Image (tube, grey):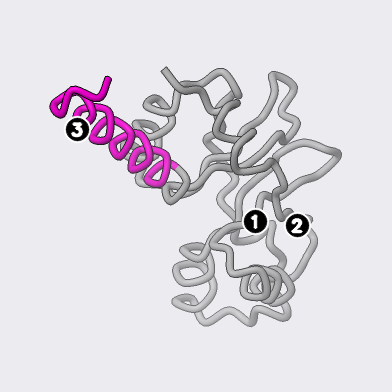
């Protein structure tokens, strides 16, 4: 069974991060520039939150807050669900589904960020596995294995 560690090795472990003291405007501009849906919020090399597109919509725009005057710490999701590198891909998918989240930081046992996986990463992984299964079944059916 595939583990998050293997997924990070394939996709890379670079993660865009921000500080809790950054403004929402700066964080949103960073997200837009890199075409990403979330920033992991880091303080003292530890994950303290996650700032997502949903946070912008629900906690800034819908509340008519000024993004230039609002700190990320005031609107980020502070109860972050993380997984370990040893979490299986299926467990990660289940955690995302059950909690209705799209991004899952990967952290070590001390809370240090190791990577970030998204629902898109998991969907791509699932699709690749299904395509491989179909290929192998086709090879078997046609007697090429």
Report which residue position mark 3 lands on: 138
Task: Please report whichever mark, 1 or 3, sits nearer to the chain's N-terminal start.
Answer: 1
Quarter holding the N terminus?
A: top left
The image's mark for residue 126 is none
Give coordinates of residue 100: x percent, y percent: 35, 46
Report which residue position mark 1 lands on: 39
In whole angstroms, how far apart are the C-alphas of marks 1 and 3?
41 Å
Instruction: Indicate yes or no whether the magenta region holds residue 14.
Output: no
- For this view, does 126 lie left or right of residue 67? left
Labels 3 & 2 near each other (Cβ < 8 A)? no
Labels 2 & 1 near each other (Cβ < 8 A)? yes
Report which residue position mark 2 lands on: 18
Numbered range of the magenta stretch: 122-145
Relative to 16, is 115 above or below? above
- For this view, does 140 lie left or right of residue 110? left
Query: In front: 19, or 73?
Result: 19
């Amino acid at each position: 069974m595939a583990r998050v560690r293997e997924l990070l090795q394939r996709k890379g472990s670079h993660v865009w991060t921000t500080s809790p003291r950054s403004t929402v405007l700066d964080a949103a501009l960073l997200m837009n520039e890199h075409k990403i849906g979330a920033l992991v919020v880091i303080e003292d090399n530890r994950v303290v939150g996650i700032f997502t597109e949903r946070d912008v919509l629900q906690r800034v725009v819908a509340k008519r807050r000024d993004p230039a005057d609002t700190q990320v710490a005031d609107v980020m999701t502070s109860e972050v669900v993380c997984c370990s590198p040893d979490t299986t891909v299926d467990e990660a998918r289940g955690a995302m589904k059950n909690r209705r989240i799209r991004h899952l930081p990967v952290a070590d046992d001390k809370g240090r960020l190791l990577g970030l996986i998204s629902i898109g990463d998991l969907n791509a992984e699932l699709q690749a596995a299904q395509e491989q299964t179909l290929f192998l079944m086709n090879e078997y059916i046609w007697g090429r294995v």
